[in-house]
């Protein structure tokens, strides 16, 4: 039966809830918004704040030892009784022990990042009772991960902050969303508004993962100078690190351009020159280039050195206008999606959500 006269905002909110229901069900949350793990940033305070506000926080394990991760999980559980996840880097030398720590502490969701996880790792997560989430940088890889037992995918476009692939979310979404239906797919990269999230939900996404917006939140432990750099920056300031010579590959990382990024170019040129002069081997030259950024994210996030450190940020940084509490950020994302649905109804004359089946 068609009901008319319903409050358009309530109807729009019901539509939104239906659109992201698979994501909410999978995460066990009120909103299908994940805060992507961010090394040094995604620790107990930010993670618990996001989960407490109805989103899904994810601890960034990064290079932590199993003991250090255990401490962080227990501390986070002390701050929230809601679901949160842990992001593990697949090339961590103690990956199995890290999975065991997550499982022993009943972490519900493990995100396997930094490469394609093995079937054995996915099985270890699932056998322990946790849900396994992976990243799909292309459709073929997404399908392979689903076959290996991954229970949800994140597709992250090159607009995102941190280590990125070459393809934008706009293209990845078209390539992947119409073809993967067996598991929920969360979109990431460059998202800062609820209406944009809504667009991807309508394309078939189950939810969205955001990083940059939360890195600059009140609850983020990032240094004030780091957050101020976010508020000041425009989208075009968040650039990917460039590779000078194809013989020395550089994994692209998106962050704010600063003295550090300029020095990185000079460092590559200098190392290349020394390699060409026969002063350094190819292997050593590659290592010198890779080591340039060692410790640089910590320097920016914790010490506030935003000139020499690595200020990882997505292109969405241009939409960070102030440092705001996590709950406010999440609330705005929901309201913007609802506004977009209401506005569409007004534009098209088609009710966003009036079809209510009476029992
Ligand atoms: C400061 C920073 C650090 C990050 N560190 C990690 C990380 O350690 N592991 C990871 O899987 N992703 C990392 N990311 C990516 C985020 O988890 C997330 O996918 C991304 O920020 C989403 O795009 P957005 O920044 O445009 O919102 C990082 C992003 C930022 C901004």
Image (tube, grey):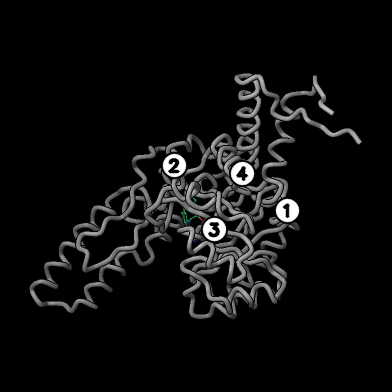
N-terminal-most mark, 2 or 1: 1
Q: Nearer the viewer, mark 4 or mark 2?
A: 2
Q: Residues within 10 Å of mark 2 (few under 14, many from 20)?
A: many
Q: Which mark is residue 317?
A: 2
For label 3, the SS is: loop
Real-space Cα separation, disc 3 to disc 2, in angstroms: 16 Å
* Numbered disc 1: secondary structure: helix
Return the disc, 1 or 4, that comes first in the chain's sequence.
1
Tell me the residue that label 1 is attached to.
25
**Which mark is first along the chain, 2 or 4?**
2
User: Residues at badges 1 and 3 in contact (C-beta under 8 Å)?
Assistant: no
Q: Secondary structure at mark 4?
A: helix
Mark 1 vs mark 3, CA separation in Å: 20 Å
Q: Are marks 2 and 1 in contact (CB under 8 Å)?
A: no
Q: Position of residue 216 (x, y in %)?
A: 51, 45
Would the CB of label 2 be found within 8 Å of ligand 1? yes
């Amino acid at each position: 039966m068609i009901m008319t006269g319903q409050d358009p905002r309530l109807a729009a909110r019901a539509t939104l809830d239906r659109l992201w229901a698979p994501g909410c069900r999978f995460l066990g949350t009120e909103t299908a918004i994940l805060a992507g793990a961010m090394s040094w940033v995604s620790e107990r305070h930010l993670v618990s704040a996001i989960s407490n506000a109805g989103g899904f926080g994810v601890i960034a394990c990064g290079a932590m030892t199993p003991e250090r991760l255990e401490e962080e999980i227990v501390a986070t559980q002390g701050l929230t009784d809601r679901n949160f996840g842990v992001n593990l880097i697949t090339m961590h030398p103690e990956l199995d022990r890290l999975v065991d720590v997550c499982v022993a502490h009943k972490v519900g969701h493990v995100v396997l990042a930094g490469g394609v996880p093995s079937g054995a790792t996915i099985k270890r997560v699932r056998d322990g009772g946790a849900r396994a989430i992976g990243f799909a940088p292309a459709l073929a890889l997404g399908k392979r991960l689903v076959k290996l037992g991954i229970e949800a995918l994140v597709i992250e476009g090159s607009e995102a902050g941190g280590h990125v692939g070459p393809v934008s979310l706009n293209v990845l979404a078209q390539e992947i969303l119409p073809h993967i239906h067996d598991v929920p797919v969360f979109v990431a990269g460059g998202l800062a508004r609820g209406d944009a999230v809504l667009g991807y939900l309508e394309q078939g996404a189950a939810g969205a993962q955001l990083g940059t917006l939360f890195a600059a939140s009140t609850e983020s432990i990032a240094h004030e100078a780091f957050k101020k750099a976010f508020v000041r920056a425009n989208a075009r300031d968040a650039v990917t690190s460039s590779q000078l010579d194809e013989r020395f590959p550089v994994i692209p990382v998106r962050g704010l351009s600063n003295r550090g990024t300029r020095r990185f170019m000079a460092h590559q040129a200098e190392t290349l020159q020394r390699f060409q002069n026969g002063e350094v081997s190819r292997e050593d030259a590659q290592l010198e280039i890779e080591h340039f950024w060692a410790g640089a994210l910590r320097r920016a996030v914790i010490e506030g050195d935003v000139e020499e450190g690595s200020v990882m940020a997505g292109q969405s940084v241009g939409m960070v206008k102030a440092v705001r509490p996590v709950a406010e950020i999440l609330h705005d994302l929901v309201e913007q999606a609802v506004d977009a649905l209401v506005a569409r109804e007004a534009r098209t004359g088609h009710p966003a959500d009036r079809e209510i089946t009476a029992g």
